[in-house]
Image (cartoon, rainbow, N blue to C red):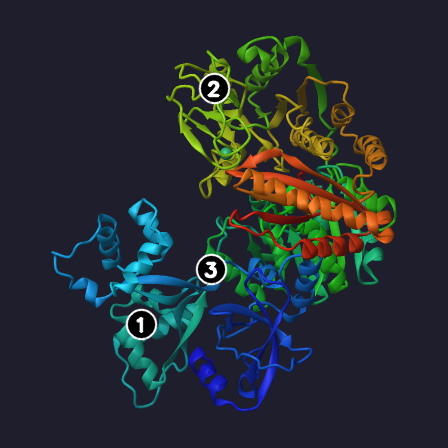
């Protein structure tokens, strides 16, 4: 149905009905709109509608019939924007749960869940008037007014864009004055909604011959092509038969063929993948599978699958997904990042072919939308994706897998700050199915849940092909602390091992969790570090760009500028990043083929996969990288892993720094010796006695956990408590601090005066955040701790409601982060 005919129905119908609508705006709750019975059939849950909201028109999402109909006059829905729902009705309770738990507007939850490029917004645009076009040259115009009119002559535009085009601020006052003169005109325009799946014309054969119809050679050609190839896009026929468009048109009118519009999916898959049979499971795998089946037989079951790397967890996932499909159910597989998705995708495609859809940020907006629609149309019962795939519009979910469940990238750290691992458990509960959290180094949270019986615990301790875990040698960096330059970071042990590895024709991996060239550039004369203008940190020198860059806000400063403090010309490049490491290794091993994998070298689409491919094909001898290289890639020829400095993340002001460090080290170490030959790991550290380092050395997760959980218990940190972080930020230092303090005082008052709250909630802060300024915004934080998530949730809501939103011109913002991951 076209939206025009829907429009008729809306305005033509009589009997009214009421719908519950979530609007795509930062406002709480849902709203009731009126519609007509004629429309009810099209305004079904999951479709977007255009609704009046205040003085604007905005996108809304239909959630269903209104529960209660208010007495006052209701506004009517203006239009239905979709011909079919964009999400399924069974996702709605999930969205409601998320909005409630994360204290986030439900319309924004849905907007963030849907593939981008679908939303309509209304903007004020300025256009030049006829009168202004005819202004005589003698008119007295200011230079800015002239520039504005010249710019508008090329098309209407928003105030913001005017400033961008003219490269200087254009005040709103000026345009209002020009409007009063009748030179410009303000109009409301809808923007957005541009990404649409590509439509194509598909030609379908109806009759090979029709009595009385002439058969020309061209018609003949088209008919035999269709006979051989089945339904064919018109543009393909055009390549085969000259003037195919006109000929097909004629044939369609005679009844030979039928031309239909169909959606053209852009396939994100690359190379052909050969089908593969499932191998016979090992005894341990069979036991694990039996355990999972038993646990999952009664509907909802959260399961921790703890298995050392190479124990065959992925094979278990493949079996479980096959089971789900055999039961006519769908399956959702979450993988932490793009490079791993492609690896997972390849294995799933080899087993399940076209049944797989993929969702991740590496896809273009159009590709994402295509995948989304395929899932909605039930063409693909399996979805593999990064964290946002937890919102995939699958019906009838029978299994959810979260691979590498401990990975911090499951937590989204902007907008809706959800954790996809936690949401997987919630969605499984709503779908009454099993959820498998897989890892070799589980998160403390998940392991604790397994220990306390909330999750079923299944363990696999043996590698499928019995390789020993790599040997880890610890090299103490403290004796070389005072060395200068390279010798400080590349110890003789590491250099020797690298040389031997190259001689044997094997590959090495060097891990340093810090990108750039030098992370502590400072002035040789006054000692002042080169700082970011917007953030409270030093800039990092990037040699390729010959510039200093901020890793938080992206601010960049040319390297040939003098010290901002004293004007001296020379700056020292102190500190060590992957870029400098690469240069050093190149100098040590000039014949070796060296590549670097970090955020700087993988910015462009496809570059990460290219590096991995080169590594796999043996075109790289030494790969240098940040935590990107730690993720579970499987490269059999890597026999040496060098951890250049294990301590980089250990001393961050964050209660999870030990957990993060342990996971990273254990994972990087696990990259060595995945093939026939044994692996070796050299772990360089300043703190060889730290329990995190000694546990990581032996990949002893349980030993690490026992120590770590004691710390958490004694300090009352998660999993012994739940946390909500309130992050207050603003451009004005005083106003930001003031609002943070207002929240703090109000919160303490409440706790003091209310016994029930007092016993359950602790308020810490406000304190200046460890990163006290980012991108020009000052940051303060408050931390709420409690044992009951529901109490904590209620306290947070009521506190923010009582204090009210920040007022005044300073635009102070409060971000609510439920179960915060990073405490900086
Ligand atoms: P994990 O995900 O636990 O690291 P994988 O599932 O990737 O482990 O398995 C490691 C390797 O062993 C892979 O190359 C996989 O193909 C292989 N493998 C897994 N299970 C079996 C099996 N039952 N028989 C033979 N090979 C297997
Ligand atoms: Zn910055």
Q: Nearer the viewer, mark 1 or mark 2?
A: 2
Location of residue 556 (image quadrant) = top left
Mark 2, residue position: 583
Q: How far is the residue under mark 3 from the one under mark 1?
A: 41 Å
Question: In the picture provided, is 659 more to the left or to the right than 639?
Answer: right
Residue at screen point 57% across, 30% down: 626
Q: Disc 1 or 2, which lies upstream in sequence?
A: 1
Q: Is residue 324 above or below residue 81?
A: above
Q: Position of residue 166 (x, y in %)?
A: 29, 47
Q: Nearer the viewer, mark 3 or mark 1?
A: 3
Residue at screen point 22% across, 48% down: 143
The answer to whether marks 3 and 2 mark residues whose Cβ atoms lie closer than 8 Å is: no
Q: Disc 3 or 1, which lies upstream in sequence?
A: 3
Between 207 and 47, the one lying in front of the other is 47
Q: Position of residue 761 (x, y in %)?
A: 81, 47
Q: Is residue 279 above or below residue 90?
A: above
The answer to whether marks 1 and 2 mark residues whose Cβ atoms lie closer than 8 Å is: no
Q: Nearer the viewer, mark 3 or mark 2?
A: 3
Location of residue 765 (image quadrant) = top right
Question: In the picture provided, is 260 more to the left or to the right than 489?
Answer: left
Mark 3, residue position: 117
Mark 1, residue position: 221
Q: How far is the residue under mark 1 from the one under mark 2?
A: 62 Å
Mark 3, Cα crowd under 10 Å, few <14 / some 14-19 / many 20+, is some
Question: In the picture provided, is 322 more to the left or to the right than 522?
Answer: right
Q: Is label 2 in a helix, a strand or a loop?
A: helix
Q: Is residue 431 above or below residue 519?
A: below
Q: Is label 1 in a helix, a strand or a loop?
A: helix
Q: Is residue 800 above or below residue 96?
A: above
């Amino acid at each position: 149905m076209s939206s025009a005919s829907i429009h008729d129905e809306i305005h033509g119908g009589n009997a009214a009905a009421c719908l519950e609508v979530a609007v795509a705006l930062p406002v709480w709750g849902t709203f009731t709109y009126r519609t007509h019975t004629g429309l009810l059939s099209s305004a079904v849950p999951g479709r977007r509608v255009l609704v009046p909201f205040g003085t604007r028109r905005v996108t809304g999402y239909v959630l269903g019939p209104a529960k209660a109909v208010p007495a006052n006059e209701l506004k009517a829905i203006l239009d239905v924007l979709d011909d079919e729902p964009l999400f399924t009705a069974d996702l709605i309770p999930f969205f409601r749960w998320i909005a409630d738990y994360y204290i986030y507007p439900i319309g924004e939850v849905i907007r963030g869940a849907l593939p981008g490029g679908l939303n309509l917004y209304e903007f004020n645009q300025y256009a030049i008037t006829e009168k202004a076009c005819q202004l005589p040259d003698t008119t007295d115009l200011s230079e800015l007014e002239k520039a504005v009119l010249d710019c508008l002559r090329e098309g209407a535009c928003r105030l913001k864009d005017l400033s961008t085009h003219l490269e200087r601020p254009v005040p709103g006052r000026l345009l209002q004055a020009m409007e009063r003169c009748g030179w410009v005109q303000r109009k409301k325009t809808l923007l957005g909604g541009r990404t649409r799946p590509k439509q194509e014309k598909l030609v379908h054969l109806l009759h090979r011959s029709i009595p009385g119809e002439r058969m020309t050679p061209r018609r003949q050609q088209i008919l035999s092509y269709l006979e051989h190839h089945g339904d064919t896009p018109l543009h393909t026929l055009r390549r085969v038969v000259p003037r195919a468009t006109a000929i097909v048109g004629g044939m369609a009118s005679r009844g030979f063929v039928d031309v239909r519009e169909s959606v053209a999916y852009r396939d994100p898959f690359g190379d052909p993948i050969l089908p593969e049979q499932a191998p016979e499971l090992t005894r341990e795998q069979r036991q694990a599978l039996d355990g999972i089946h038993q646990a999952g037989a009664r509907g909802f079951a959260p399961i921790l699958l703890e298995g050392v790397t190479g124990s065959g967890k992925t094979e278990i996932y493949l079996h479980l997904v096959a089971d789900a499909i055999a039961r006519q159910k769908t399956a959702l597989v979450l993988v932490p990042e793009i490079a791993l998705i492609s690896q997972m995708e390849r294995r799933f495609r080899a087993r399940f072919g076209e049944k797989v859809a993929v969702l991740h940020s590496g896809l273009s907006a159009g590709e994402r939308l295509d995948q989304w629609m395929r899932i909605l149309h039930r063409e693909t019962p399996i979805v593999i994706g990064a964290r946002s795939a937890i919102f995939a519009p699958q019906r009838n979910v029978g299994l959810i897998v979260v691979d590498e469940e401990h990975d911090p990238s499951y937590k989204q750290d902007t907008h809706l700050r959800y954790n996809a691992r936690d949401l997987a458990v919630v969605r499984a509960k709503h779908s009454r199915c099993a959820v498998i959290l897989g890892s070799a180094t589980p998160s403390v949270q998940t392991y604790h849940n397994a220990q306390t019986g909330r999750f079923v615990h299944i363990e696999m301790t043996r590698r499928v092909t019995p390789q020993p875990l790599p040997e880890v040698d610890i090299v103490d960096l403290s004796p070389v602390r005072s060395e200068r330059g390279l010798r400080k970071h590349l110890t003789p042990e590491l250099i020797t091992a690298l040389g031997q590895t190259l001689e044997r024709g094997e590959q090495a991996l060097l891990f340093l969790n810090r990108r750039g060239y030098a992370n502590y550039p400072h002035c040789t004369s006054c000692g002042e570090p080169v700082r970011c203008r917007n953030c409270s940190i030093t800039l990092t020198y990037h040699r390729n760009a010959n510039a200093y860059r901020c890793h938080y806000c992206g601010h960049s400063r040319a390297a040939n500028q003098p010290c901002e403090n004293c004007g001296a010309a020379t700056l020292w490049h102190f500190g060590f990043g992957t870029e400098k490491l690469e240069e050093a290794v190149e100098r040590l091993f000039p014949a070796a083929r060296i590549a670097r994998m970090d955020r700087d070298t993988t910015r462009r689409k496809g570059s990460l996969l290219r590096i991995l491919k080169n590594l796999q094909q043996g075109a790289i001898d030494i790969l240098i990288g940040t935590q990107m290289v730690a993720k579970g890639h499987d490269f059999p020829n890597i026999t040496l892993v060098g951890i250049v400095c294990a301590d980089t993340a250990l001393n961050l002001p964050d209660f999870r720094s030990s957990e993060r460090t342990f996971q990273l080290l254990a994972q990087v170490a696990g990259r060595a010796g995945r093939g026939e030959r044994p692996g070796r790991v050299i772990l360089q550290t300043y703190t060889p006695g730290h329990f995190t380092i000694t546990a990581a050395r032996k990949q002893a997760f349980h030993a690490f956990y026992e120590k770590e959980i004691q710390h958490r218990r004694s300090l009352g940190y998660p999993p012994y408590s739940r946390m909500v972080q309130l992050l207050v930020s603003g451009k004005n230092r005083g106003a930001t601090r003031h609002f943070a303090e207002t929240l703090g005082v109000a919160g303490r008052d409440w706790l003091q005066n209310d016994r029930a709250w007092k016993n359950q909630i602790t308020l810490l802060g406000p304190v200046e955040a460890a990163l006290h300024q980012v991108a020009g915004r000052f940051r303060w934080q408050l931390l709420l701790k409690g044992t009951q998530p529901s109490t904590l949730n209620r306290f947070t809501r009521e506190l923010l409601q009582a204090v009210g939103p920040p007022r005044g011109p300073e635009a102070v913002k409060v971000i609510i982060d439920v179960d915060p991951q990073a405490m900086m």
